[in-house]
Amino acid sequence: MAQNIFEKIKNIEDLPTLPSVSMDVIRLAQSSDISINQISERIYTDPPLATKVLKMANSAYYRRGSRQIDTLHRALVLMGLSEIISIITSVSALSILPPKNSESASIRNSFWEHCVATGLIAKYIDKKLCMQNKGKEFVGGLLHDIGKIILDEYCHDEFIQSHEMSKKTGCPIYEAEMELLGTNHMEIGHFLMSRWNLPSYLADINLWHHDPSNAESKEITALISLSDILAKSSILSFGDQNSCYVLKDEDSWNILKGLGYPMDDLDLEKMTFEIEDMSAEVKTYIASITEDDKGAGKSE
Amino acid sequence: MIKGPARVSEFSTTSSSLMTDNTFRLLRDFIYENSGIYFSDTKKAQLENRLSLRLRANNLSDYDKYYYLLKYDPQAGKEIRALFDSITTNETSFFRSPPQIQAFQEKALPEIMEKKGDLDNKVLRMWSAGCSTGDEPYTMGIIIKELLNERLSEWDIKIFASDISEKALRSARSATYNEYTLRSVPPEIKNKYFMPNGTSYKINDEIRMLVELQYLNLNNTKRVRLMKDFDIIFCRNVLIYFDDEAKKRFVAQLYDNLNPGGYLFIGHSESLHNISRAFKLVHFPGALGYKKE
């Protein structure tokens, strides 16, 4: 069975994909000399996406004051490129593989809660450590577990069983996946990022977020790995909720420390309390996107 | 320790003033820096209620002015004590702060017991420092009994429970509790370990035997030094009564009081950052613990 599931998924012809404009924008953001006009022009070639981005920019989550943001150009000027890239990735990613029933809706919801939490925590740590990943950290956090949603969609029973096995035996979820599916969400996610032709840091994050020392893009993979752990030890876990962590013993921590970030100066307790406070923010974020979906349906 | 003065009323808002989110954040950071206690976003209303009394006492019309008083007034020191008194409660209850209790029950305790069981050293020593009316040490006792069941007799177990208040200790000795303090106790646990006694409930003897209550002033360094060889120490919502120097001294002493591999649990929103770097900070699901390696 082992090879089969990975092969099976590889061979699915209509495997979900992000809108091509979203993928372009994520790629464009890699180059340093990109202009606001280039980005907004590219987004406008996908009018429904442009509408969704503007709705999110005006949503409960982002809205400050009563002034309406009515053009992408304005949104880019006011909110910055990295925020717009985060929004585009969120509205695109959260609409792939919509749930089929209430059971899958609840799985998808806690899945995206964990991913959004990981993205927001990555953004928070990026800021704390002045890392300047410029939105890549949110995109990375949001997409780091994307393999799970594919496994859930195409091998639902085994995927659920692997969660149960991990809960029961205390083994990490990817080990249970390997045992029952012959592959794991990291391999699938890595494959998907490459298939979508997204920047290599995203493939790296997918493959190595549980073992960042092997990653080529070490810094950002370590950041996502650490954020993933912090999301798990707050209430925003998706599976793996039984784990305990000593952050200072984690590879991700020591990689960032080795790169010269002042890890020992972080007030870990306060950081943990502030992350716990983020759960409301995560819910508002997702609600704003879902609300946007409903609204966009009407206007398209 | 006495957990604060008589409880401050939760219902005494000043009608004139509301706390803005921005002021809340300023006050929260101020309180955290000065006491190590963090008020989460969900506790904004609680903080607002409690500080309303301080506003009134200082004749101030809004929370911004109160923040400036704390931050810049030459008399601020005195007010900070009053502020701490108003934000602490003497409230304690069974199974308080569920994620912490869960970390104790499902992680720390099994880890320690497994290690000691392997070494055939079936001795377990715990300390509830600042036990107030006994809810915490008896909760620990119930959890241990639930974990070991009939194997309890194979172990030598003692839960020391200390407080500075004779009154609280008398109440702990009576081991009698009202419905309200038992509100977080699962019904099957309540039936198993509590005997109805009029309108209240008395905890059964098997659990009482595990707990040894004693008077102890945590400022008494010589006495505290004698508390030796603990596997787990609970010292929740007590540190606020010490100034920074005393806190550092006391926490260093708690470190020495623990066995290697032992855990210290402080209050759910309390922090040892800037107080001690000796422990290893462990992230349990929804709770923090401090481990001595």
Image: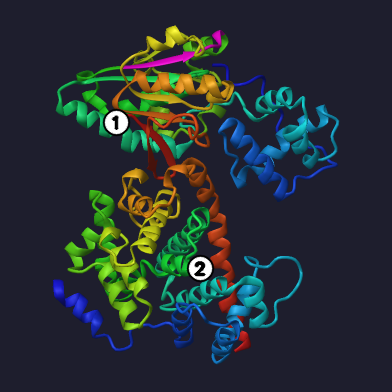
Label 1 element class = loop
Q: Quick check: can you spot residue A60?
A: yes
Q: Residue at x 23, y 63 (%)?
A: A177
| Residue A12 versus residue A283 in the image, above or below | below
The residue lying furthest to the bottom in this view is A45
Residue kind at label 2, given as amino acid type: Lys
Q: How is the image coloured?
A: rainbow
In this rendering, which labeled residue sits more in front, label 2 or label 1? 2
Task: Check chain identity for marks 2 and 1: say if they share one.
Answer: no
Q: Looking at the picture, how far across and down is residue B154, in whole percent?
A: 19, 20
| Residue A212 versus residue B28 in the image, above or below | below
Q: Which residues are magenta?
A: B158-166
Inspect the magenta stretch and tell me whether residue B178 lies in it.
Answer: no
Chain letter of mark 1 equals B
Residue A30 occupies quadrant:
bottom left
Crowd class of label 1 (few under 14; some 14 to 19; many from 20; radius 10 Å): few
Label 2 to label 1: alpha-carbon separation: 39 Å
Badge 1 is on which residue?
A: B293
Q: Residue at x 49, y 27 (%)?
A: B236
Residue kind at label 1, given as amino acid type: Glu
Label 2 element class = loop
Q: Residue at x 59, y 82 (%)?
A: A36
- Rendered image: mark on residue A243: none
Q: Quick check: can you spot residue B194?
A: no
Q: Nearer the viewer, residue A237 or B249?
A: B249
Q: Is residue A279 left or right of residue A147?
A: right
Number of numbered discs visible in the structure rendering: 2
Q: Residue at x 46, y 79 (%)?
A: A31
Q: Quadrant of the N terminus of chain B?
A: top right
Q: Nearer the viewer, residue B7 or A116?
A: A116
- Rendered image: mark on residue A134: 2
Q: Looking at the picture, how far across and down is residue A171, in whole percent?
A: 23, 52
